[in-house]
Amino acid sequence: GGKLVLKGVLDVEDARLAAACGVDALVVSNHGGRQLDGALSSIEVLPAIADAVGNQVELWLDSGIRSGQDGLKAIALGARGTMIGRPHLYGLGAFGEAGVTRCLEILAKELDTTMAFCGHTDIRAVGRDVLHPDSIPS
């Protein structure tokens, strides 16, 4: 019992197969580039995977989220949410629990400010239209 979340998907066909097999969520991730330094970036493959699986599964992005603006880009390209592997660890290392809290506050404020600059107050309304066409991976 519980949700089945598959992390480390970078290929459209793998995403389709996982969705067809009934996973509850996919995490588009290259594991921070630690496994294969030549792997595609997560944000680069996210739009194609989002187009391939649509609303069949919940889609998250991991790897490369360092600011609220990065989070907004991921949402705009089809992710429902993101993970933040390193930033909270930097806060933890610098100031312990208070550092993690401050890190999350900074990311939330950056996301809020970026949304305001894009004319949005609801993250669910953010789409690819907030991005410059040349910045959208093909």
Image: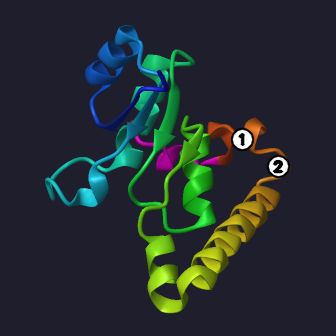
Whole-number angstrom distance, CA of label 2 to CA of label 1: 7 Å
Identify the image quadrant of residue 126: top right
Q: How is the image coloured?
A: rainbow
Please give the label number shown on residue 111.
none
In the rendered image, residue 127, in percent from the top left (x then y), is placed at 67, 37
Check if residue 133 falls in the magenta segment: yes
Residue at the front extreme? 1
| Residue beneath the point at 41% across and 20% down | 23
Q: Mark 2–mark 1 contact, CB under 8 Å?
A: yes
**Which residue lies at the image location 66% right of the left edge and 79% below the top edge?**
102
Q: Which residue shows up at 41% across the image and 60% down it?
A: 64
Label at residue 120: 2
The type of residue carrying mark 1 is: Val
Q: Is residue 119 magenta?
A: no
Looking at the rendered image, the quarter that the C terminus falls into is: top left
Which residue sits at x=71%, y=65%? 108
- Give the secondary structure at mark 2: loop
Residue 119: give x, y in percent of width and height: 83, 52
Q: Which residue is mark 1?
A: 126
Residue 44, image x, y percentages: 37, 45
Q: Position of residue 90 (x, y in %)?
A: 45, 80
Instruction: State which region is magenta.
Output: 131-137
Mark sitting earlier along the chain (2/1)? 2
Above/below status of 62 relative to 106: above
Kind of residue at badge 2: His
Give left or right: position of 53 versus 17: right
Side of 138 where 56 appears, left or right = right
Q: Nearer the viewer, residue 117 or 82?
A: 82
Secondary structure type for disc 1: loop
Residue 126 vertical placement versus 117 (above, below): above
Of residues 50 and 82, the one drawn nearer to the viewer in this rendering: 82
Describe residue 36's horizontal placement relative to residue 46 as left or right.
left
